[in-house]
């Protein structure tokens, strides 16, 4: 599915890709938005053995609610990132920027993209989408490599907290 | 400012004797200059930005392009997540056909967000 407006990111408070949410048969979230690579090709960014995540996914598919990877309601709520007023304002700025860009007013859109980025600095999606729509160096004075270097040890993705994989 | 008819069309909220109402929830009209309703003779206008402020709804505008964007209420988004019921959405696929999350009730869903930038 194509999500031009980043609607899913707004609804689930996602800030990066790839991000996945596990939803059970009743439509209930059982794992919150988390980094979701299928292998370790980006382990310098994930800092997690992603084969454990995939094994957990298989375990959930096989065992459902009995899987140790299904989080209890309390733990799940603790791990969820909840939208704040700043998040919602960032999303509104981002959407208006997208609208202006789509209407051909791409230079006017940049200010709104920058405000979204300032309000939600942890959102790589706001950064990378805006950079992809213009020249990042020229209009934002940065690029992906510089921004990653500026993390200075801070994880690019929130570290995964996974239980042991069943033997 | 929009007419009461346009208010319903663009937001779903309806101007009533109790204030503006949506799905059984009514926001009373504040008195005096704080009101989101302006009455001029036979005309009635609703100030959407003032109403949005009361609703804690973010508003971003580009007056030069005559565009106002009214975002999601953060508390509404948070309440939906805290309920742990996966928020529903409808999106098109590559062929333009729309799909909703709710169509997949009864099956496990691995909802994966990716991007091609």
Image (cartoon, rainbow, N blue to C red):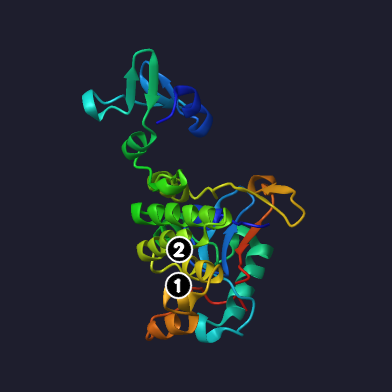
Tell which subunit mark 1 falls on.
A
Picture disc at residue A110: 2
Q: Secondary structure at mark 2?
A: helix
Query: Which badge, 1 or 2, comes first in the chain's sequence?
Result: 2
Of residue B78 and residue B35, the one placed in the foreground of this image is B35
Q: Quadrant of residue A60?
A: bottom right
Residue B20 image position (x, y, % from top left): 39, 25
Of residue B12 and residue A77, the one placed in the foreground of this image is B12
Residue B14 image position (x, y, % from top left): 45, 24
Query: At 39% from the left edge and 17% from the top edge, which residue is drawn?
Result: B43
**Dot 2, crowdedness within 10 Å: few (<14), some or many (≥20)?**
many
Query: At 46% from the left edge and 59% from the top edge, which residue is drawn?
Result: A108
- Residue at label 1? A139
Q: Residue furthest right?
A: B95
With respect to residue A157, does A117 lie above or below? above
Residue A44 image position (x, y, % from top left): 51, 87
Marks 1 and 2 sit apart, C-alpha to C-alpha, by 8 Å
Instruction: Give left or right: position of A117 versus A64.
Output: left
Residue A27 image position (x, y, % from top left): 60, 49
With respect to residue A70, does B25 lie above or below? above
Q: Secondary structure at mark 1?
A: helix
Q: Residue furthest left?
A: B32
Tell which subunit mark 2 falls on.
A
Residue A129 visible in the snapshot: yes
Of residue A115 and residue B100, the one placed in the foreground of this image is A115
Tags 1 and 2 on a common chain: yes
Pointer 1 with pointer 2, Cβ within 8 A: yes
Query: At 23% from the left edge and 23% from the top edge, which residue is drawn?
Result: B31
The image shows a total of numbered marks equal to 2
Of residue A50 and residue B96, the one placed in the foreground of this image is B96
């Amino acid at each position: 599915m194509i999500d031009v407006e980043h609607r899913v990111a707004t609804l689930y408070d996602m800030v990066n890709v790839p991000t996945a949410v596990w939803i059970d048969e009743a439509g209930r979230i059982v794992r919150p938005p988390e980094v979701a690579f299928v292998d370790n090709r980006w382990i310098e960014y994930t800092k997690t053995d992603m084969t454990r995540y995939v094994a957990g996914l298989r375990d959930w598919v096989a065992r459902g609610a009995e899987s140790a990877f299904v989080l209890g309601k309390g733990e799940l709520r603790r791990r969820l990132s909840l939208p704040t007023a700043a998040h919602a304002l960032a999303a509104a700025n981002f959407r208006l920027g997208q609208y202006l860009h789509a209407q051909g007013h791409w230079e006017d859109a940049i200010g709104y993209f920058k405000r979204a980025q300032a309000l939600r600095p942890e959102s790589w999606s706001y950064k990378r989408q805006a950079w992809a729509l213009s020249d990042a160096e020229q209009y934002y004075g940065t690029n992906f490599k510089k921004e990653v270097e500026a993390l200075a040890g801070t994880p690019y993705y929130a570290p995964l907290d996974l239980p042991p994989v069943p033997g | 400012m929009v007419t009461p008819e346009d208010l319903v069309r663009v937001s779903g909220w309806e101007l009533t004797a109790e204030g503006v109402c949506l799905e059984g929830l009514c926001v009373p009209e504040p008195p005096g200059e704080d009101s989101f309703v302006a009455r001029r003779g036979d005309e009635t206008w609703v100030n959407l930005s003032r109403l949005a402020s009361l609703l804690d709804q973010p508003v971003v505008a580009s007056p030069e392009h005559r565009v106002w964007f009214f975002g999601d209420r953060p508390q509404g988004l948070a309440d939906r997540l805290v309920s742990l019921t996966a928020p529903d959405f409808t999106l098109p696929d590559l062929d333009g056909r729309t799909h909703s999350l709710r169509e997949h009730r009864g099956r496990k869903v691995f909802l994966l967000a990716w991007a091609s930038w």
